[in-house]
Amino acid sequence: MQKLVQGLHQFQSQVFASHKDLFERLGKTQAPETLFITCSDSRIDPNLITQTGPGELFILRNVGNLVARYEEHIGSTAAAIEFAVVALKVREIIVCGHSNCGAMQAVLEPESIQDMPAMKAWMAHAKETGRLVRENYGHLEGEARFSATVEENVLVQLENLRTHPSVAAAIERGALRLHGWVYKIQTGEVFAYDAAQAEFVPLAESGVKPLDEAHRSRDLSI
């Protein structure tokens, strides 16, 4: 706790003090362009890996970066998605899985969460991931099977996103795009799903290009 308190003091005295105008603007409104859905894992920092600042990402985190199908569960995750799309009018949604994910380990080894009833109930939203892995990746073992599970889970959640009425309507209008990413903690690499190749490729090789700095609407970096 002491480390957190010290960090708060440093933020208030150094970071906040030098970015007062930014936080004054953010105190009145927010206009993120991207909803970033990722895992609760402590090793994942969306702003760090994308080098974005306050106000640029609307971040939704939960165990396993899961998105329940709309008809199966109306809760906090569905509310956040709806708010991002309808109220904030985000233009991009990224579902970002990651290496060494404990939730994906639970997909492969359901017995590991038998003593965690809440976790077990939540992971029911990954049952389709488990089915796909069992049916299509029985020939893989170890890290290869784990990586396939992480990737398939991202794709399943993208499909689940499409069942949300607000998302489906925005896609139909051409106002929203969906992206699937996998972040490798140990290397810092990000792989994006390329529909044309039907596989995850290094982000630099995907169709998503870095935003030209000259055309950025604002600089929120800290």
Image: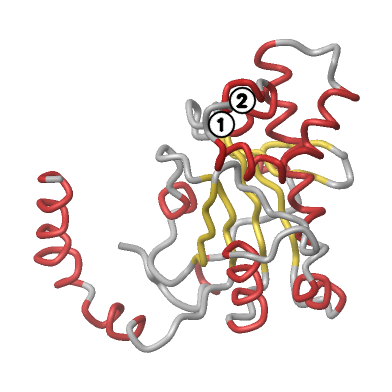
The quarter holding residue 147 reads top right
Q: Secondary structure at mark 2?
A: helix
Q: Residue at x 46, y 81 (%)?
A: 30
Q: Residue at the location (72% across, 29% down)?
A: 149
Q: Secondary structure at mark 1?
A: loop
Which image quarter: residue 150?
top right
Q: Which mark is residue 86?
A: none
Q: Nearer the viewer, residue 158 or 213?
A: 158
Q: Residues within 10 Å of mark 2 (few under 14, many from 20)?
A: some
Which residue is tagged 2? 105
Give the percent coordinates (x, y) of residue 130.
78, 31
Cα separation, mark 2 vs mark 1, equals 6 Å
Q: Position of residue 14 (x, y in %)?
A: 12, 63
Residue to which mark 1 is pinned: 101
Amino acid type at circle 2 is Gln
Q: Nearer the viewer, residue 189 or 216?
A: 189
Residue 3 versus residue 47 in the image, above or below: above
